[in-house]
Amino acid sequence: MTGANTINFKLQTLINQYEATHPLSKNHFERAQKVLPAGSTRSVLVSRPFPLIVESADGTSFTTIDGVTFEDFVSDYSAAIYGHSHPVIRDAVQNALASGFSLGGITQKEAQLAEIVTERIPSIEKVRFCNSGTEANTFALATAMAYTKRKKILVFENGYHGGTLSFGSKHETNPMNLPHDFIFAKYNDIPTTKALLSNDLAAILVEPMQAAGGMHPASREFLAYLREVATATGAVLIFDEVVTSRLHYHGLQGYWGIIPDMTTLGKYIGGGFPFGAFGGSSQIMDLFDSPDPSVALHHSGTFNNNIFTMSAAVAASNLITEAELQRLNRMGDRFREQGIELIRASGFPSMELTGYGSAVGIHFSGPDAAVLGDCFYFFLLAKRISVGRRGFVSMNLIHTEASVDRLLGAVKGFLDDITGVTA
């Protein structure tokens, strides 16, 4: 066999093993496809030949309907930073359930959560809640355009800001995106960004680290440049910290000391329930409280302040301490650094690890990159370890150094196996 055929054969062997181990998941997927396009309502979870169907989860593990238990290093794409079914959050939700739900009114939890968010995130003086990171970025852009009375929005290739704000290269079009007047710049590249600037920008929307785009952190110089440009042009600088706010107690804006005009949040802050938030300076956010009807903004949503999210988020905030986030980042750094050492020692040139702290990107290169990525994914599943198929690892607070050791052991096993195939 040629090298490419050998790798393809290896992948098919792993897939055959996967199918044989999870027949109930396969059966359910075939049933789901009859009523759900692609068998799911969340595209990131769609996985061929079929995805695992989860029955239950606790701590760092989940169990499928086939009765197979995996150690989970996806952590619901960073939303499950507390692990699964954390007792502190479970108790808060049970208390909320006892008090009544769909209350249709304001509770004390709403202001309590706002106080927590404004204390943590330097740029947020006032905040509004919504139901996802997608909503948060959608509302933040609308707010910025209303505030500046401009339309143009500077975004970056490979950026992801939700289901309707997902960008590949500037040459790609996504029919699901909102029809804004987008200008596409190259991430982390000051010269090419500079060439696209104008004085009629409404907003600059950027992730301090591109998460779905491969866990590629921005440099401090790049973010500082965007801050300088936004100030000079009057554009609203928006940091999408839906993922990155978990990498430092005050977000990456706090770590770098670069403060945007607005910040969007989501995922883990809701304690496992639907959550999004957008906030910024009082001057901007007070558009939602303006006595002038010609400029006042209206933002509503039945579940923006639902009692389950508010209660879970307030309880979960007690678990997010500076010390715990530092411990989490140390584990992620150790996995990345020792993983890179394993790759170098193996002599396998086609694998790379990127990221920051507890968020790790796994990349393969060369003509067989996609097949190698799938081999890695299914190899780890055979070892009862789950990572994101696109190359994603997110540590959670229940993971331990022993968890990191198991993940590193699986990486070494893969490298030993794949170098034998590709030699």
Image (cartoon, helix red, strand yellow):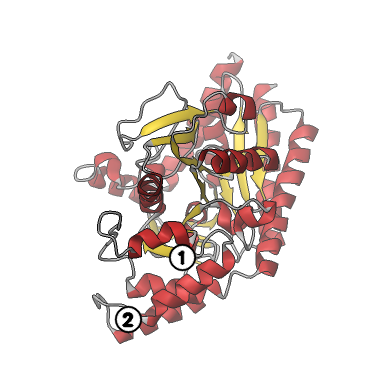
Q: Is residue 316 above or below residue 227?
A: below
> Could you say which quadrant of the image residue 173 lies in?
top left
Residue at 41% x, 43% y is 44
Three-letter code, disc 1: Lys
Q: Position of residue 329 (x, y in %)?
A: 68, 56
Residue at 47% x, 26% y is 169
For the residue pair 388 and 22, the one nearer the viewer reads as 388
For the residue pair 255 and 58, the one nearer the viewer reads as 255
Circle 1 SS class: strand
For the residue pair 82 and 11, the one nearer the viewer reads as 82
The residue pinned by badge 2 equals 97
Labels 2, 1: front one: 1
Q: Position of residue 404 (x, y in %)?
A: 68, 55
Residue 86 — which label? none
Three-letter code, disc 2: Leu
In this orientation, does residue 277 appear? no
Residue at 59% x, 13% y is 2
The residue pinned by badge 1 equals 126
Q: Position of residue 193 (x, y in %)?
A: 57, 28
